[in-house]
Image: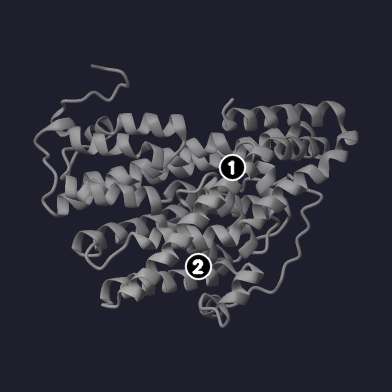
Amino acid sequence: MAIVYRIGAAFVLGSIAGLTIGEPVMVLEPLGDLFVRLLSMIVVPIIIFTLLMGIKELSPTSLGKIGGQVVAIYAVSSMIAVTIGLAVANLIEPGTGMTLTDADFEADEAPSFMDVFLGIVPENPIEAMATGDILATIFFVIVFGLALVLLRESTDDESVRDGVETVFNVAEAGSKALFKVVWGIMEYGVIGIFALMAVAFAEAGIEVFSTFAMLALTLILAVTIHIAVVYLGVMILLLTQQSPIAFLAGIKDALLTAVSISSSSATLPVSMSNADDNLHLNEGIYSFSLPLGATINMDGTGMYLGIVAIFAANIVGASLTLVEQVTVVAIAVLAGIGTAGVPSAGLILMTLVLTQVGLPVAVVGFIAGIDPLLDRIRTMTNVTGDLAVATLVGYWNGGVDFTSGSWSGETDLLPGAD
């Protein structure tokens, strides 16, 4: 049975166990705590190795006009997505009325914006990694990775070039090894999530269902606003002056695939096929934009991180300052390039965000059971954004034919239609 179904079953069975057995099920609490600790264990290694792998693919020639446009739009879109997620969460306030008794929270004095800005640059990068300072770790790895890329392109010394490739090869091997570790953690997660849900329902009772429903509603509303306004309204209708309906008709296969398998990377072949056959984009544009988007475009996950941060704060009876909410935006955008292709990236990024703003990581385990369901919504958002950005960049560079394909009504919006 696929892991997503086993996690779903663990979520349901653990919930039932907590509601029916009650307090005696609290004996399982250490099993849930172990799952949370395992997730926390891999945060920094995941950031280092996968971020280096993402930077490895960059080169001075690929960062030309088109590359600059693609990266800039992804960055702006991600910031907007996280901001929308925070705004909707602040409006709906998911998690209010729910309490995790083991999720202690002590509010520290909020640092100034300048302190947060300067804190991105580590005085000692090794110390930043050891203490779990995520923003500082990301900054150092990006700077170091770009330096390696530039050195590889500029040096005439074969031994130096080989040394750079060795570093990237080690990063690749480390990434693959960490994928195995993540796979193992998620296998154990079936037990961990059962325990977490049993304990949560034993503590909170039936009213916890309304908490999950509000979390899902908040994400769905934020996703709807982002897709309708940013992708369809601004990128397609306003900037390219084309029909959003025609665009959706052209990408329906990719959207259905994304919802089915909840993976931007695995959806990539379908996305590229839709870009070529239905949207009639230039291959030189979509072959660069779509793979890059599958790696760094985290709009759906980004807005969810903002929502989860507010959700976690409400659960522990705290509130996030404006500076802390800006920090959430920064983490989501910067970390997206490194973790988008990682299995269970949403859970890992949740751990990053909650750790950075001082909220309990236990919340990650609490909502992990419904994460596979919400992940499908986030993946659909990411894939829509990938194709919208590719279309916009194609329009700016004369790389899209708006006289044929879905733009001329040659495809049908209804799934399965001829």
Q: Is residue 145 above or below residue 38?
A: below
Horizontal arrangement in the rendering, residue 412 relative to residue 200 (left or right): left
In the image, 265 versus 336, the foreground residue is 265
Q: Position of residue 42 (x, y in %)?
A: 62, 56
Q: Amino acid at mark 2?
A: Ile
**Mark 2, residue position:** 138
Horizontal arrangement in the rendering, residue 286 relative to residue 303 (left or right): left
Structural distance between the alpha carbons of marks 1 and 2: 23 Å
Disc 1 or disc 2, which is closer to the eye? 1
**Mark 1, residue position:** 183
Q: Earlier in the sequence, mark 1 or mark 2?
A: 2
Q: Could you tell me which secondary element the residue under label 1 belongs to?
A: helix
Give the residue furthest to the front.
159
Instruction: Specify whether residue 281 is in view.
Output: yes
Q: Amino acid at mark 1?
A: Trp
Q: Is residue 274 above or below residue 84?
A: above
Mark number for residue 91?
Answer: none
Residue drawn at x 58%, y 39% is 371
